[in-house]
Amino acid sequence: MMGNPAKGTLYVVSTPMGNLEDITLRAIRTLKEVDLIAAEDTRHTRVLLDRYNIKKRLVSFYSYNKLRRKDEIINSLKDGKDVALVSDAGTPGISDPGFVLIRGVIEENIALTPIPGPAALITALTISGKPTCKFVFEGFLSNKASKRRRRLEYLKSEERTIVIYESCHRITKLLGDIKDIMGDREIAVARELTKKFEEIKRNKVSAIFEHFSNTKPRGEFVVII
Ligand code: SAM
């Protein structure tokens, strides 16, 4: 593989958010060629690897072991091994533990190569109908109500399109806070992108809030304001 001959290369490989066909030829080749794959959830990634008949050693790299595992993976890279980093969904490093490893690799002056592909924020933004020439990505807002509401107060006067990640557990609370603090704006909510129950709602916050108050929210969400 390409890269620093003394040390290995960390390949930051984007993988599908749901539909297993959303993977590039280069991502498949890279996953086949590296020595090791660091994955947020090894069982989840195994499904993808099985689909493409990739038999490769997997190590887990997730929120609770990321600091210890970061050092182990960096040592493998220093030993000349090539490593692929994948997340549960989309692009590693975007609102997931991958960021810690990417920073560590940069600090150690180890080669880093992105293998681009899907990311939920861009996928949601493109079909939101909101202006895409300027936008801000807020990732997950705090799960503490006071902090989340303070952030929404701050964002109230933002002129650019705002993209927020949320899980099914807190989406109704988030929509309620947006309605109270930012007003009853026209927003877009993308749910389960590329999956069987993909759904995109474009409506006033109050209408979408009411919908998810009456129908139990399931899956993964991106909110675009
Ligand atoms: N690294 C990922 C990316 O490239 O978008 C994001 C990882 S973050 C831990 C997970 C969040 O991404 C979810 O809570 C949700 O907000 C968003 N997300 C991931 N997959 C999604 C999907 N299929 N549909 C909608 N949102 C999704």
Image (cartoon, helix red, strand yellow):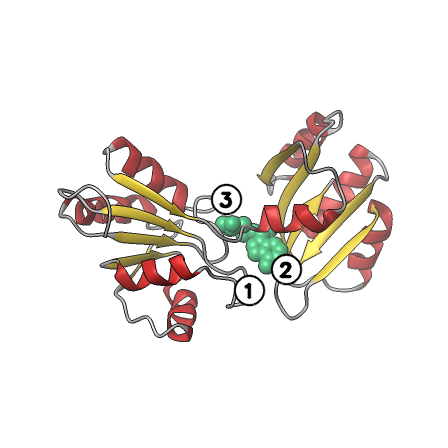
Mark sitting earlier along the chain (2/1): 1
Res. 169 visible in picture: no
Q: Give the structural element (helix, strand or loop) at label 2.
A: loop
Q: Amino acid at mark 2?
A: Leu
Q: For the residue carrying disc 1, how many other residues have a C-alpha within 10 Å: few (<14), some (14-19), or many (20+)?
A: some
Q: Give the structural element (helix, strand or loop) at label 3.
A: loop
- Between marks 2 and 3 in the image, the one whose residue lies nearer the viewer: 2
Mark sitting earlier along the chain (2/3): 3
Report, in whole angstroms, how far the alpha carbon at label 3 lies from the one at label 1: 17 Å
The residue positioned 39% from the left and 57% from the top of the image is: 26
Q: For the residue carrying disc 2, how many other residues have a C-alpha within 10 Å: few (<14), some (14-19), or many (20+)?
A: many
Report, in whole angstroms, how far the alpha carbon at label 2 lies from the one at label 1: 7 Å
The residue positioned 61% from the left and 63% from the top of the image is: 194
Q: In the rendered image, which residue does mark 3 sit on?
A: 95
x, y percentage for residue 79?
13, 47
Mark sitting earlier along the chain (3/1): 1
The residue positioned 46% from the left and 47% from the top of the image is: 96
Determine whether the beta carbon of the residue marked 1 sits less than 8 angstroms from the nearest atom of ligand 1.
yes
Proximity of marks 2 and 1: CB atoms separated by less than 8 Å: yes
Q: Amino acid at mark 1?
A: Gly
Q: In the rendered image, which residue does mark 1 sit on?
A: 18
Q: Amino acid at mark 3?
A: Ser
The residue positioned 79% from the left and 33% from the top of the image is: 182
Front residue of 86/4: it is 4
Left or right of 41, for residue 128: right
Front residue of 103/143: it is 103
Q: In the rendered image, which residue does mark 2 sit on?
A: 193
Proximity of marks 2 and 3: CB atoms separated by less than 8 Å: no
Report, in whole angstroms, how far the alpha carbon at label 2 lies from the one at label 3: 17 Å
- Between marks 3 and 1 in the image, the one whose residue lies nearer the viewer: 1
Q: For the residue carrying disc 3, how many other residues have a C-alpha within 10 Å: few (<14), some (14-19), or many (20+)?
A: few
Determine whether the beta carbon of the residue marked 2 sits less than 8 angstroms from the nearest atom of ligand 1.
yes
